[in-house]
Image (cartoon, rainbow, N blue to C red):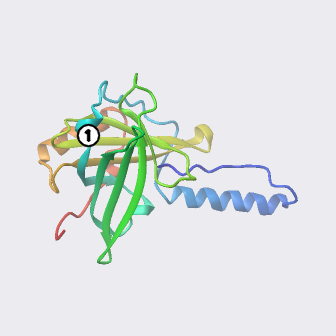
Amino acid sequence: MPLPCVVSQIQNTPAKMWSALVFLGCVLATTAQVVRPGGCPKTVTQTTLDLQQYLGNWYEIYKFWAIFEVGQKCVGANYQMKNDSHIRVDNSGIRSGSKVEAIGDLYMPDTKHPANLKVKFASSAPYGDYWVLDTDYKKYTLIYSCGPFLGPLGHVEFAWILSRQRTLDQSIVDKLMTKAKAFGIDTGHFSKTDQTGC
């Protein structure tokens, strides 16, 4: 989920110190994900999304760099429906031989746009975009998230290609990369996730 650089008024803080704190916060935010100039690409999500078919295990094949995944391999996610029509997201991976896990909450805020989902991984955090650009439910899903950074000056992005298996046919990867490029997403930011020895 994008980490916004929020500027608010703090009383009794010298202007130079406040400017330095804002700058430091912005630098930390930019190092936490992919940042590009200008507005977000004009993407189009799937017109339909069957959440029941989407549930279950997914494995990360490609991702945009994100600080919370540094050093991880064998990254996967399990999606399970909860009683409140939200979905429990159990993200897990292995870092330095130990399992790491993050539990999130995913939901559909507008049934008119079923693939424009929202997700968060901390109770105090705001929901971030989780847009399903393409999925066949059985083999792959292409997920994208984008939000503004410093107003109209830039944007922050996350993207993932997930598979039902720890591998994915190259022809499908190529198809999804082509689709992402057509939306103006810079696929050069994708890196392959290590799914060996899991």
For the point 17% across and 57% down, the residue is: 166
| Residue 125 percent location from the top left of the image | 55, 51
Give the amino acid type for the residue marked by disc 1 in the picture. Tyr
Residue extending farthest to the bottom is: 97
Mark 1: secondary structure: helix
Q: Residue at x 62, y 45 (%)?
A: 150
Residue at 25% x, 41% y: name it: 141
Q: Residue furthest top?
A: 112
Q: Residue at x 31, y 65 (%)?
A: 93
- The residue nearer to you, when weighing 103 against 73, is 103
Q: Quadrant of residue 97?
A: bottom left
Q: Residue furthest front?
A: 83
Numbered label tally: 1
Quickly name the residue at label 1.
54
Point out residue 65 in the picture as x, y percentages from the top left corner.
Answer: 39, 57
Q: Nearer the viewer, residue 40 or 121?
A: 121
Q: Residues within 10 Å of mark 1 (few under 14, many from 20)?
A: some
Report the front residue among 116 and 38. Answer: 116
Let me know if residue 106 appears in the view.
Answer: yes
In the rendered image, the vertical position of residue 40 relative to residue 157, given as above or below? above
Where's residue 173, x and y in %? 19, 45
Whether residue 177 is visible here, answered yes or no, is no
Quadrant of the drawing holding the C terminus: bottom left
- Residue 167 at x, y percent in the picture: 15, 55
136 relative to 193, above or below: above
Instruction: Give left or right: position of 14 versus 104.
Output: right
